[in-house]
Amino acid sequence: MKYDFTAIEKKWQTKWKDEKTFACQNGDTSKPKFYGLVEFPYPSGAGLHVGHPRPYTAMDVIARKKRMDGYNVLFPIGYDAFGLPTENFAIKNHIHPAIITKQNIENFTRQLHMLGYSFDWDRCVDTTDPNYYKWTQWIFLQLYKHGLAYKTTMPVNWCTSCKCVLANEEVVEGVCERCGAPVVRKEKSQWMLKITAYAQKLIDGLDTVDFIDRVKTQQRNWIGRSTGAEVTFKATTGDDIVVFTTRPDTLFGATYMVISPEHRFVKEWKDKLQNWDEVAAYVEEAGRKSDFERTELSADKEKTGVMLQGVRAVNPVNGREIPIFISDYVLASYGTGAIMAVPAHDTRDWAFAKKFGCEIIEVVSGGEDVQKEAFTAKDDTGIMVNSDFLNGMTVKDAIPAITKWLEEKGIGHEQVNYKLRDWVFSRQRYWGEPIPMVWCEKCGWVPLPEDQLPLLLPEVESYEPTDNGESPIAKMTDWVNTTCPCCGGSAKRETDTMPQWAGSSWYFLRYMDPDNKDALASKEALAYWGQVDWYNGGMEHTTLHLLYSRFWNNFLHDIGVIPHAEPYAKRTSHGMILGKNPHYVGNVETEEEKQALIDKYGSQAMRPSVKMSKSLGNVVNPDDVIRDYGADTMRLYIMFIGDFEKTATWSDESVRGCKKFLDRVWNLSEKLKEGDGCSAENEMAVHRAIKKVSDDIEAMKFNTAIAALMSLVNDFYAKGATKGDYRALLLMLSPFAPHLCEELWEMNGYGGQVCLQPWPEYDESKTVAATAKMAVQVGGKVKANIVVAADASDEDVVAAALAEPKIAKLAEGMTLVKSIVVKGKLVSLIFKPQ
């Protein structure tokens, strides 16, 4: 019978949907629970791309095996549907974002069903549903009531195309992460979330979870904890300039200061600065750069700045006057917005000093000539010099000594700082959650009463971002004008909306109890499901969604809403799938053609594989693969493509190879021998496969698990297979190719659905061969082979080798002087004449 994958897949998808095969129950204490999570998709108009199935299929394989292991499995899906792409599409095509979102979600749902994922569809969430974003707004109000949401005017990242504010995390190399347009600095009133109040908790929490090392490292680096001291310098104007330094031991070597272009003293000293025009021009130029551009540490980056003429600073440890510069590498938002510069012992300060002719004074000996390069070692090899009472100390001893001295003099104290900035939470766009706050001239900012949630997003005729930086909602006067919940007077609603990250910061909690009208989820559901047991997602979200959701979860735990501080017990990440590069030099033959590609495309021409994009024409549409080869082939290939954590290149030839493997599995069903158990011929191969596949699924080594199943099928074709052998194969293959296995399971009358059967068990003793075939070497050359018990001792192996007729003949008249046994492989014998 032909393997009609189209009919088979539709049949089982319909059955699973109608019978709610994968629905799970809250509070089922008869089984252990398992909560597996994937990052829910943004439902774009383009539909699923080939990058989505990789993490989804991986977690589906794990979820399916967990069910077979006897777990009550929560494996949910939803849609992160607010945000700029939909709004931009709406503006371009004059269609309401809500209509586009509904269409996109329907298409995504169709595609996800086509791939046979075992989601519990009854728990599907949509961040644009008022029943969902009511609780997003509720969480915001709790943050406000606990002092963690506030409004302030500050320099922000402004996307020149999206015409809205971006968080620092959304600016990549000076451009908007979303659209690629230049980002400039702008003063704006913004809602902020005080994530900095949780900086240390977010660091400490990483010690309690099972995240892959690179994820933990990125989180720690982004939060950026540093210990040092705050020190007060006096300006010649009498003002106090406070700096933060991790090297207070080098204070005697501070030969100039740098303040950020936005520092309040710059404007306050305007009348005292003899070069104000030059200073003002530099401040304006710095405003066009993102924080990333300003702090980027590349060695060849030109150091820029302007010395303030007319105001100087006084080094508090020696009373020396030193120059003050403004430079864009100092940020107003980090530390105090001012630094002391010690060029002898800081690489960036040294380069700046060399450019601007500043003095370089050695205060830590142990390096080469500090006039030629900075000496930055902080260990015991560095000894303090030119530093008064610190002279002769190691750096390690000097830091606490100078900190104590500063505290005694009242001019400094120990301080812990973080690179992490508060989260810019306003967006001047339409398609987002309304911020439930009201401005009253008398009462100030007033939160909307919780019983008035959700605050619905009004329908507007125009979604165009405004040139003045206000949200399009600002034009909706009937919606904007309201009464103050506090005094009853006239008031105005906040017209900025929340960022896309808001809805995704807590969605994993809503999955636990998606229809609850009285809370974001019931106490019972939250207690039962607890932490997400395993969360798989992309590395690109490590400093965005992952950090934000951990912050919200920690906060909700602190106010008693949820039982666990950390949302995810385990986090893994997957590599990207690349497409073939149509401009690769390997695609052409002549040197002239290769050089033409290099001239036109530069270094990209040297890469055989690149990120998929429409412009390159190398995007793979899952619909096309499913049409031509079936969903099971797509699933199998996407797991077989390579190491899950690493990038891999799509190959049409390999897809066809996976289809051929499934054809072999299908055809094998017509060649089965009778017998319900494992056959003697295949027993060891089956038990080894069960052990290998079980271990590899847990370790996310899907490619080697599939390779083991391919090897098992080869054995079955070579030795024949009973129905019992085949049954074990279908159980192991079913998480990868569920439709095919369900059909074959039914055809062979095994009973029930394969996805609801217990996972097969293996006997460790049956994974090890009873005997071993070993080569026998004499004088370094193989002369014979022997078969011995697998657990035979070295003495027994040597005895068996000597008893082998060929070896016995060679040993006549000889004395055995040495034997070497390589367990299970060979025995080497060395003779000499008697």
Image (spheres, grey):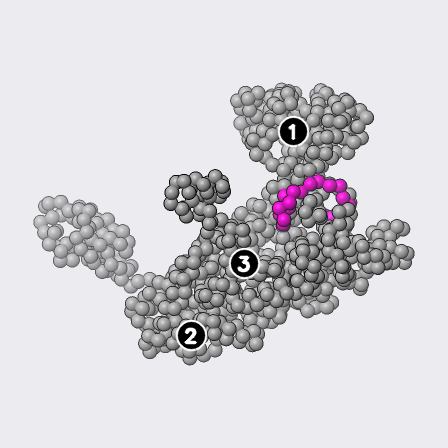
User: Within the image, what quadrant is residue 790 found in?
Assistant: bottom left
Asked if the magenta segment contains residue 716, the reply would be no
Q: Nearer the viewer, mark 1 or mark 3?
A: 3
In the picture of the structure, the residue carrying the numbered disc 1 is 304
| Neighbour tally class for label 3: few under 14, some 14-19, many 20 plus, Cα within 10 Å | some
Residue 481 to residue 67: above or below: above
| Neighbour tally class for label 2: few under 14, some 14-19, many 20 plus, Cα within 10 Å | some
Which label is found at residue 49? 3
In the picture of the structure, the residue carrying the numbered disc 2 is 744
Residue 748 to residue 334: above or below: below
Q: Main secondary structure of the magenta part?
A: strand
Q: Nearer the viewer, residue 457 or 119?
A: 457
SS category of the residue bearing label 3: loop
Marks 1 & 3, CB-CB < 8 Å contact:
no
Query: Which mark is first along the chain, 1 or 2?
Result: 1
SS category of the residue bearing label 2: helix
Q: Please indicate, yes or no, whether residue 588 appears anywhere in the rendered image.
A: yes
x, y percent for residue 629: 44, 66
